[in-house]
Image (spheres, grey):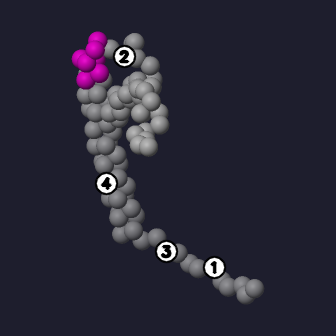
């Protein structure tokens, strides 16, 4: 394997200024996202509190089903439901 001399990297003032500006921009976006998340959590907790007096009686599974809009219905135990509509 051939050995070569190390590459020289130079850090310029413009590079550091650009880095700082990008860093500040990312931090401001993160703060905005955090603020939106905090407001979203407060809104969802208000909704759940108003829709039944709290989540004390609900299980974790029920809360998940409510959040995603899943409403499981029990299947009837009749012959057509078990075997389908078979015609002879």
Q: Residue at x 40, y 40 (%)?
A: 85
User: Horizontal and vertical percent for residue 20?
Assistant: 37, 58
Circles 1 and 4: CB distance less than 8 Å?
A: no
Q: Residue at x 45, y 30 (%)?
A: 79
Position of 38 relative to 25 (above/below): above
Numbered badge on residue 55 = 2
Quarter of the image holding residue 77? top left
Mark 4 or mark 3: which is in front?
4
Mark 1 or mark 3: which is in front?
1
Q: Nearer the viewer, residue 81 or 20?
A: 81
Circles 1 and 2: CB distance less than 8 Å?
A: no
| Cα gap from disc 1 to disc 3, whole angstroms | 13 Å
Residue extending farthest right = 1
Mark 1 or mark 2: which is in front?
2
Q: Which residue is mark 3?
A: 10
Query: Going from the N terminus, do you reach mark 1 or mark 2 first?
Result: 1
Numbered badge on residue 6 = 1
The stretch in magenta equals: 47-53
Q: Quadrant of the C terminus?
A: top left
Classify 10 Å Cα crowding around label 2: few (below 14), some (14-19), many (20 and above): some
Circle 1 SS class: loop
């Amino acid at each position: 394997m051939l050995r070569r001399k190390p590459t020289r990297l130079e850090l310029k003032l413009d590079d550091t200024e650009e880095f700082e500006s990008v860093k500040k921009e990312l931090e401001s976006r993160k703060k905005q996202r955090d603020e939106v998340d905090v407001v979203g959590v407060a809104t969802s907790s208000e909704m759940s509190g108003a829709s039944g007096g709290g989540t004390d009686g609900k299980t974790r599974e029920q809360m998940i089903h409510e959040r995603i809009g899943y409403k499981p219905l029990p299947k009837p135990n009749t012959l057509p439901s078990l075997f389908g509509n078979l015609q002879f």
